[in-house]
């Protein structure tokens, strides 16, 4: 391991950074036979970059040479960039040494496609095998499945990795074909189905034989780029909802499009990545994964885009004001979950705590309910409840928005003005 | 005023609670013997720690609630907050006086406070697990310092023991001046006497570092800088997740060192 490895890291981590997945959760691989490492089922972040994202895994590309020419990708064949390739042993050593120092939770390995999918995939799988077998390493491994690689290789990958993923990137097939002529939905969805079936099979097998090798215990995930194509939030979330259901995906990641190939006229010219929209999509994703919402309750024909001003849960509540206010001391858990300002943990605590006696506003605050938002949507058994008798959605929205702006204005008000404004 | 003084151990606190209930004292303050200030007008009760008395209360609490709740009380104790002893006393009294399990009665102030404090302690323990950075020394020991807000190192030892079973390691609490050492067989508590470590920054002296250590720290810094997406810069979130008080332990945030390198 020499100084030149630093240059390789810079190139191949730089090439891998647009993959947003960094979760190390979902697997509880124990440390066997006094080896190195284990996987914690709740996942652990080890650092945070200046863009506010977490570093949990050592995210690298095996190589940034690629035979494909996808318009949205920094590593596309037609780009004139510095290219390099890691050897299998280099990645293995980096992973082990970083892991031993508690820098990382494991490895996330992706790759450009060289020669053919099988050739590429084989070397990626070799990294996982060397880590597990040669080094008795039990930490987390996330492998990118290369579309078009043989089923046998995908099977092998699943036996040594904790999570597999295939990125869809573009939410509609037409737009995918436009931007990535070498790819199609079938090639991406087929491996997903294969992985899903193998995971199900493996679960059956492990029920019978406890020592059967596990197949991708942390499941599979995918990524969708947001803002590179005119797809609506509804199309994106419909696809995501579908993937969670039919492919049993653990996570769908949304990645705000960062214009890396500005010369390509098929792509929109953006002054900044659509971070707000990306954030709203994640919030919506949370709603159907943890809050018992259905996709068409959040986006539908009448409402194809998420509101950028307010979060999707508040937006839903305002559009469905008929169901509020709800009585905290009587409503079902599912209904309490729908109240803006009440999260999963608070809702659970409310349901547990109200068995001991009726809850009032003061107690709700202490439990962790954000009353600033929730007060419009709930009643307790107190007389002077904050809740509106008749709800005026527009008024509530205005009230909540001005509440947010107040904080911002307060800051601006006290800011020292510059004597010589630069620009 | 009734002032209860104990020896600052968890067992001591439970013994104190046992005696308070036994002698029917109404305590105004429970304080560790290292911290208390003598009050001229107070009745002082000095508690002699007693394993049997400790177990009596511990088991009674366990029976009335469960193991998990005992763990919560222990974690709250590790917070070392000034009023924590009285809060634990109030909470235990509530548990013992109630005819039902009060564990999930979040409408109750004591239940809520204990839960919130133990959550803070758990979070700090998790931060140790996240941000501890080992440095490899010449004698192949992986050394790490930390300066946690609460006394949480004991909560993290199991994690490191399970994870790093094939390397010797040390985790040292620079604020409380004790730590743990794993010698490939067992973990034991240590204090460091003659040291080659800067207790302020947790850095191992150059001559005691393994020859490869600087290279891997530089590789890690190189990785850290390249994985950042400049177009998404968001320092507010960055600082929220990675507060400045941890920076001195993280090679990737070691700005002083970075300047020397470049």
Image (cartoon, grey):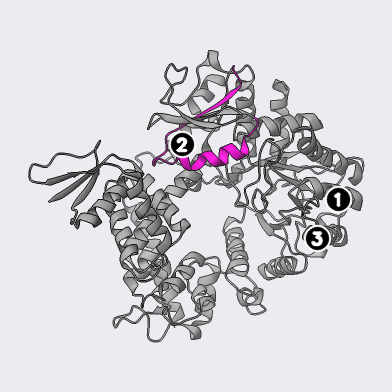
Question: Mark 2 and mark 1: span between their CA atoms?
Answer: 41 Å
Counting residues from the start of the chain, the first of labels 1 and 3 encountered is 1
Looking at the image, which is closer to me, B139 or A243?
Answer: B139
Looking at the image, which is closer to me, A341 or A228?
Answer: A341
Q: Is residue B149 left or right of residue B249?
A: left
Residue that mark 3 sits on:
A208
Whether the magenta-drawn stretch holds residue B148 is answered as yes
Secondary structure at numbered mark 3: helix
Looking at the image, which is closer to me, A202 or A140?
Answer: A202
Question: Going 49% across and 40% down the picture, which residue do you hit?
Answer: B128
Chain of the residue displaying label 2: B
Whether the magenta-drawn stretch holds residue B253 is answered as no
Residue B13 at x, y percent in the picture: 30, 47
The residue most toward the left is B41
Q: Which mark is residue A154?
A: 1
Secondary structure at numbered mark 1: helix
Whether label 2 touches label 3, CB < 8 Å = no
Residue A52 at x, y percent in the picture: 54, 46
Q: Quadrant of residue A294?
A: bottom right
Residue A21 at x, y percent in the picture: 67, 50
At label 2, counting other C-alpha atoms closer than 10 Å, the crowd grade (few under 14, some 14-19, many 20 or more) is some
Residue that mark 2 sits on:
B246
Question: Going 19% across and 53% down the picture, which residue do you hit?
Answer: B27
- Image vertical order of residue A371 relative to residue B224, above or below: below
Q: Is residue A408 visible?
A: no
- Give the residues drawn in magenta, as a range: B139-166
At label 1, counting other C-alpha atoms closer than 10 Å, the crowd grade (few under 14, some 14-19, many 20 or more) is many
Secondary structure at numbered mark 2: helix
């Amino acid at each position: 391991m020499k100084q030149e490895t630093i240059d390789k890291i810079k190139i191949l981590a730089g090439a891998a950074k647009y993959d947003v997945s960094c979760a190390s959760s979902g697997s509880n691989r124990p440390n066997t036979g006094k080896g190195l490492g284990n996987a914690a089922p709740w996942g652990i972040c080890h650092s945070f970059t200046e863009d506010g994202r977490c570093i949990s895994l050592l995210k690298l590309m095996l190589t940034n040479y690629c035979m494909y020419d996808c318009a949205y990708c920094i590593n596309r064949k037609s780009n004139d960039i510095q290219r390099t390739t890691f050897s299998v042993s280099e990645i293995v050593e980096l992973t082990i040494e970083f892991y031993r120092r508690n820098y990382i939770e494991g490895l996330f390995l992706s790759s450009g496609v060289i020669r053919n999918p099988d050739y590429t995939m084989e070397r990626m799988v070799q990294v996982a095998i060397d880590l597990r077998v040669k080094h008795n390493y039990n930490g987390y491994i996330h492998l990118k499945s290369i579309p078009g690689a043989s089923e046998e290789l995908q099977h092998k990958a699943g036996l040594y990795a904790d999570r597999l993923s295939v990125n869809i990137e573009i939410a509609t097939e037409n737009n995918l074909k436009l931007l990535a002529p070498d790819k199609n939905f079938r090639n991406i969805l087929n491996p997903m189905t294969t992985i899903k079936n193998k995971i199900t099979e493996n679960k059956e097998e492990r029920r019978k034989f406890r020592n059967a090798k596990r197949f991708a215990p942390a499941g599979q995930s995918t990524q969708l780029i947001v803002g590179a194509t005119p797809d609506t939030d509804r199309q994106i979330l419909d696809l995501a909802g579908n993937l969670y259901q039919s492919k049993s995906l653990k996570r769908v990641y949304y990645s705000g499009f960062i214009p890396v190939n500005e010369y390509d006229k098929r792509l929109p010219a953006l002054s900044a990545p659509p971070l707000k929209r990306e954030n709203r999509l994640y919030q919506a994703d949370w709603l159907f994964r943890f809050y018992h919402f259905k996709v068409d309750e959040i986006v539908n024909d009448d409402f194809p885009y998420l509101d950028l001003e307010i979060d999707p849960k508040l937006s839903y509540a305002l559009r469905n004001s008929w169901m509020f206010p709800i009585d905290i001391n009587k409503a079902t858990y599912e209904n309490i979950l729908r109240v803006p300002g009440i999260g999963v943990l608070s809702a659970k605590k409310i349901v547990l705590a109200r068995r001991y006696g009726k809850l009032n506003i003061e107690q709700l605050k202490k439990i962790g309910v954000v009353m600033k938002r929730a007060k419009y949507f709930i009643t307790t058994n107190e007389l002077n409840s904050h809740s509106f008798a008749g709800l005026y959605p527009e008024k509530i929205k205005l009230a909540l928005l001005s509440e947010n702006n107040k904080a911002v204005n307060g800051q601006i008000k006290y800011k020292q003005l510059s004597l010589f404004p630069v620009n | 005023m009734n002032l209860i003084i104990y020896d600052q151990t968890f067992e001591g606190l439970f013994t104190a609670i046992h005696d308070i209930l036994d002698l029917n004292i109404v305590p105004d303050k429970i304080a560790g013997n290292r911290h208390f200030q003598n009050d001229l007008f107070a009745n002082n009760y000095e508690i002699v720690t007693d394993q049997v008395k400790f177990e009596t209360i511990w088991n009674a609490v366990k029976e009335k609630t469960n193991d998990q709740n005992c763990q919560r009380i222990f974690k709250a104790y590790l917070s070392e907050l000034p009023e924590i002893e009285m809060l634990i006393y109030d909470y235990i009294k509530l548990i013992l006086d109630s005819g039902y399990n009060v564990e999930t009665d979040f409408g109750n102030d004591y239940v809520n406070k204990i839960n919130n404090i133990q959550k803070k302690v758990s979070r700090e323990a998790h931060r140790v697990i996240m941000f501890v950075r080992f440095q490899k020394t010449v004698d192949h020991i992986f050394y790490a310092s930390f300066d946690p807000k609460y006394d949480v190192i004991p909560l993290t030892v199991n994690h490191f023991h399970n994870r790093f079973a094939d390397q010797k390691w040390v985790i040292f609490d620079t604020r409380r001046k004790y730590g743990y050492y794993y010698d490939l067989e067992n973990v034991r508590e240590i204090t460091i006497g003659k040291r080659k470590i800067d207790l302020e920054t947790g850095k191992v002296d150059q001559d005691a570092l393994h020859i490869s250590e600087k290279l891997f720290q530089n590789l890690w810094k190189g990785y850290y800088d390249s994985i950042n997406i400049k177009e998404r810069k968001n320092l507010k979130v960055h600082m929220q997740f990675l507060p400045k008080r941890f920076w001195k332990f993280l090679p990737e945030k070691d700005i002083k060192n970075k300047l020397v390198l470049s």
